[in-house]
Image (spheres, rainbow, N blue to C red):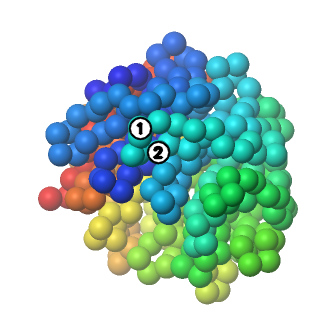
């Protein structure tokens, strides 16, 4: 059990195999700054240093030096943050670094092959206002941000996937309507370009780079906020999407985790009526989904991390549908063994 209930936290695997879980919406429905470390050896959480700025709906990545970068989100006032903090595992403390050029709620953050971080889109004010087309690059060597190319379509709630060729696929999201509109970012030119259509708008989908280099984009909320079972594969060599098998249960704001064997675990989410405990496995060889063991607790707005032993940690989230309440302090692990 974590020290605090957390809906919409960040979760990142550390180099030592532990997991840092930080921030989120707490049991009082306001942002928290506290953080916990999960130790897979003892299957327990322990408190670590707190962030300077409480936040939820932030984005995070592990830098090449092992530190954890956390950017944006909403603060205790319920408005967007432009602040960025970095967690140092060797000291268990956070340090504020340069601010982004604008506040960003639900942006994406992607570690590029050169060790810099691409931060894209988000909402500039709160979870209801002002989709951003802008993007910026963080350089850990200088601790500074610089502007880069802009999206063709402003968005939050999208996915960002680093492809094997070093480009970044941005897919889906929301700009007042649920979006299709995939784009590709090229770190060499610093520009975005439109790529093939998914064929289905998706808000809050998930995306995973498969072992064959394709990207699986699945679930989410589609046109007219229908809850989706469909999934699509992106082929970076052709720049096109094609449909693959459908899930057994429609869901949005689920987690999806690439397993060591190349399958993808899809867990939880919200179908706009019920918070789900169900889970499925996608098999890229057959292109089909199959039901697997359910979580012990229904949860959405949770976080997932694949541990070094191949198990998956599912942590925090909310047990109640809608916009507030139900933050969860528990966590569980999924094992294929």
Identity of the residue drawn at 29% across and 67% down: 260
Position of 164 compared to 328: left or right? right
- Is residue 98 at all visible to an observer of this figure? yes
Q: Is residue 90 above or below residue 92?
A: below
Q: Residue 172: x and y, percent? A: 67, 56
**Which residue was labeled with disc 1?**
92
What is the quadrant of the N terminus in the image?
A: top left
What is the quadrant of the C terminus in the image?
A: bottom left
- Is residue 25 at all visible to an observer of this figure? no
User: How many numbered marks are there?
Assistant: 2
Identity of the residue drawn at 30% across and 53% down: 17
**Which residue was labeled with disc 2?**
88
- Confirm or deny contact between disc 1 and disc 2 (CB under 8 A): yes
User: Real-space Cα distance between discs 1 and 2?
Assistant: 6 Å
Position of 294 compared to 152: left or right? left
Identity of the residue drawn at 73% across and 53% down: 144
Q: Residue 134: x and y, percent? A: 82, 54
Position of 189 compared to 236: left or right? right
Q: Nearer the viewer, residue 228 or 258?
A: 258
Q: Which of 267 and 287 is in front in this view?
A: 267
Helix, strand or loop under label 1: loop
Position of 323 compared to 26: left or right? right
Q: How crowded is mark 2: few (under 14 residues within 10 Å), some or many (20 or more)?
A: some
């Amino acid at each position: 059990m974590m020290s605090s209930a957390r809906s919409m936290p960040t979760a990142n695997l550390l180099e030592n195999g532990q997991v840092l879980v930080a921030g989120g919406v707490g049991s009082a429905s306001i942002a928290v700054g506290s953080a916990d470390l999960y130790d897979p050896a003892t299957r327990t959480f322990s408190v670590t240093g707190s962030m300077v700025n409480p936040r939820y709906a932030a984005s995070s990545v592990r830098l090449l030096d092992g530190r954890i970068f956390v950017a944006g989100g909403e603060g205790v006032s319920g408005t967007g943050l432009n602040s960025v903090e970095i967690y140092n595992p060797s000291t268990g403390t956070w340090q504020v670094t340069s601010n982004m050029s604008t506040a960003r709620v639900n942006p994406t953050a992607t570690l590029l092959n050169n060790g810099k971080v691409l931060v894209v889109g988000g909402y500039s004010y709160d979870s209801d206002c002002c989709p951003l087309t802008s993007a910026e690059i963080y350089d850990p060597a200088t601790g500074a941000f610089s502007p880069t190319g802009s999206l063709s379509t402003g968005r939050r709630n999208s996915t960002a996937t680093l492809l094997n060729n070093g480009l970044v696929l941005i897919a889906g999201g929301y700009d007042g309507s649920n979006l299709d509109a995939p784009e590709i970012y090229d770190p060499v030119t610093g520009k975005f370009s439109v790529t093939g259509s998914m064929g289905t708008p998706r808000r809050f989908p998930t995306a995973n780079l498969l072992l064959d280099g394709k990207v699986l984009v699945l679930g989410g909320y589609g046109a007219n906020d229908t809850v989706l079972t469909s999934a699509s594969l992106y082929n970076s060599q052709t720049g096109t999407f094609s449909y693959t098998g459908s899930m057994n249960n429609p869901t949005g704001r689920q987690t999806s985790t690439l397993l060591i064997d190349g399958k993808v675990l899809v867990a939880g989410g919200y179908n706009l009526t019920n918070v789900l405990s169900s889970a499925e496995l996608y098999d890229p060889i057959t292109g089909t989904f199959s039901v697997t063991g359910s979580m012990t607790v229904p949860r959405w707005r949770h976080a997932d991390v694949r541990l070094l032993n191949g198990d998956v940690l599912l942590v925090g989230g909310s047990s109640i549908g809608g916009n507030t309440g139900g933050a969860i302090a528990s966590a569980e692990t999924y094992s294929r063994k």
